[in-house]
Amino acid sequence: MQPDEARRIRPLKLQIVTAQRGDTAQTLAARMPIDRALEKFLLLNGLDRNAALKVGERYKIVVE
């Protein structure tokens, strides 16, 4: 790995968030700084593509 490549690598971690009124899988996935965020949000949380989020339920998202 070249030094300039190493500087571009950023550590990612999981954060637990509580769904608020109006949140969807798409809106929570949009907060994730990764490629294919929606697919990964659904996978992390064991959800189907058409599943509705429950207000007050806790979900995992990827953050920097």
Image: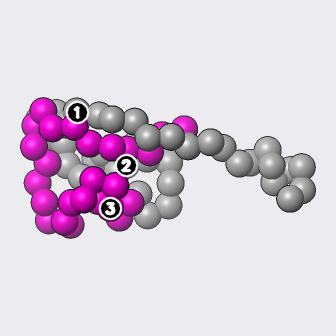
Q: How far apart are the two marked residues, 3 and 2, measured between alpha carbons?
A: 15 Å
Neighbours of disc 2 within 10 Å: few (<14), some (14-19), many (20+): some
Q: Amino acid at mark 2?
A: Ala
Task: Report which quarter residue 64 is drawn in.
Answer: top right
- Can residue 26 be seen in this snapshot? no
Q: Which residue is mark 2?
A: 30
Q: Give the left or right position of residue 23, taking residue 44 as reference.
A: left
Bounds of the magenta span? 39-64
**Residue at disc 3, secondary structure:** helix
Q: Which residue is mark 3?
A: 43
Queried whether the magenta region covers residue 61, the answer comes back as yes
Q: Which residue is mark 1?
A: 18
Residue at 89% from the left image edge and 49% from the top image edge: 3
Label whose residue precedes the other's in the sequence (2 or 1): 1
Label whose residue precedes the other's in the sequence (3 or 2): 2
Residue 61 placement (x, y as % from top left): 37, 44
Residue at 27% from the left image edge and 53% from the top image edge: 45
Residue at 29% from the left image edge and 59% from the top image edge: 42
